[in-house]
Amino acid sequence: MNRLSSIRQQFTPSRINVYFSILCFFSPPVLGSVVSFVFNGGGLWSVLLIAAKRRRFNVDRAALALTIAIYAYCASNVLASLVNHAIVRDARHLIPLVTFLLFPISYSTWSISQKTTLVRIIVLASMAACLGALLLAVYQQYRLGMRAEGGAGNAIVFAEVLCLAVVICVASVLSGMERYRIALVCAALAGTIAIIYSGTRIVWLSLLIAGIAVLLINQQRLRGRNAVHVLLLLAAIAVTIAVFGFHTIAGRVAFLHSDWDALAAHGDHTTALGLRVALWDIGLKAFREMPLFGHGVGATRLLIKHGFQDQFGIDEGFNHFHNGFLTALVQAGILGAVTLAAIFVVAARNAALVLRDSADPIERFGATMIVAVVITYLTAGMTGILLGHDILDSVFMIFLVSGTYLACGRQAALEGQAVPSAEGLAPPPAARWPVRARQ
């Protein structure tokens, strides 16, 4: 009986949220598609809990605005298939939209967590993810002789989700919310090395831009001793890149230069750069054919295959156009691209309002998470996948859900319980987070 009681204590709603959050933030670069099973499985289970009235549906104003934008994007994709009389053909391609439809459900369940507990889980799980990713990257780089792709099975996806983990570690150090600063700095450096080993040039740019954004968000803290610490961190990053990444960076830059010469001088579209340029040309032509509603999500692969054969005499196949917005334009037309852009605009606006009005470090941390995911996805999505990959879709929702809740959400109570008082939400003494009210 005591053992049964102990098991029940380990699987209370709050405890389950802790385990769920750990997996969501640790698994993307290390365990790959496990994050998709965890997030989607958790969302579907939450649907049952809400239907059984064991959870309350909780959507704040900021989350409601995001929900409207996300649902509009999903509707635009369904509408494109309906207009093209291809709803049956596209059915299996529309199933991944469930990940986006789960946004308000997952938000309702995640918002029963104490914010201080959730922040600590996010930081520590991201730190562990950076360290685990480095171990995988080193093994793949030196033992298998391949570009590092971690557990994601794709170097670009691996680098993109790892970039977010690195930014979380850096944001935690700069905000002063976590006392394990040395460990976090080491984790950020480890994640940076793994991203370099992935050879994903566009994510190197994403990491740079996101890092600058985090510095700007925390600029008020960059004075005196903190400024010295930041300079030392930047110096450590520079040395790390020089020591571990020079060979990889030089090789990737040389490949880019070679691809550019082949394309400009000989019109060679068989290189990595040439294929992207060809994809953009095919995509723009397909968009002009069906500008308003697009061709439907299931037509992309066939359009690309025929485009390569007809326009370039190449037998190649892709399932996206290596540009997120171009893919949206082809699949769902102008309506699809506008609704996709609306998700990022609404998310960025939510974050900007919090960063302008709030001095609460937890709220600012949540806003920083949103800024990081918007910058990373938009930058990497210009030459790769924006949305439409199971890992990227799940991580995008995870950051939007948790970031929005931390930045501007209210904690929800379990059915039959009251929301904990402010005293009950006080952070642990070790964390030393100076929570202040909004100004």
Image: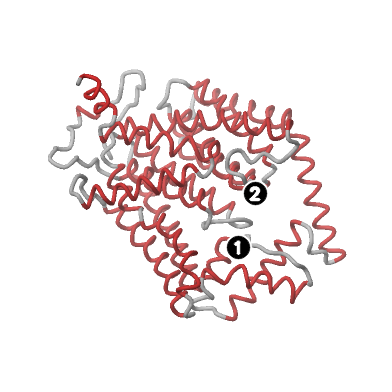
Disc 1: which residue: 320
Asked if residue 30 shows in the view, the reply is yes
- Nearer to us in this view, 238 or 389: 389
Residue 215 makes an appearance in the image: no
Q: Quadrant of residue 193?
A: top right
Q: Is residue 360 above or below residue 392?
A: above
Q: Position of residue 34 (x, y in %)?
A: 48, 42
Task: Give me the disc on residue 202.
Answer: 2
Kindly state the secondary structure of the residue where label 2 is placed: helix
Q: Around disc 2, counting alpha carbons within 10 Å, would you say few (fewer than 14), some (14 to 19), or many (20 or more)?
A: some
Q: Is residue 362 above or below residue 386?
A: above
Left-right relation of 46 to 293: left
The label nearer to you, 2 versus 1, is 1
Quarter residue 13 falls in = top left
Q: Residue 315 in the image: x percent, y percent?
A: 75, 67
Q: Amino acid at mark 1?
A: His
Mark 2 vs mark 1: which is more N-terminal? 2
Name the residue: 50% across, 21% down.
225
**Residue at 66 percent of width and 69 percent of height:** 304
| Neighbourhood count class around disc 1 (C-alpha, 10 Å): few under 14, some 14–19, many 20 upward | many
User: 199 above or below 127?
Assistant: below
User: Residue 138: x, y in percent?
Assistant: 68, 30
Amino acid type, mark 2: Ile
Instruction: Give the image location of residue 281, x and y in percent.
Output: 69, 71
Q: How is the image coloured?
A: secondary structure
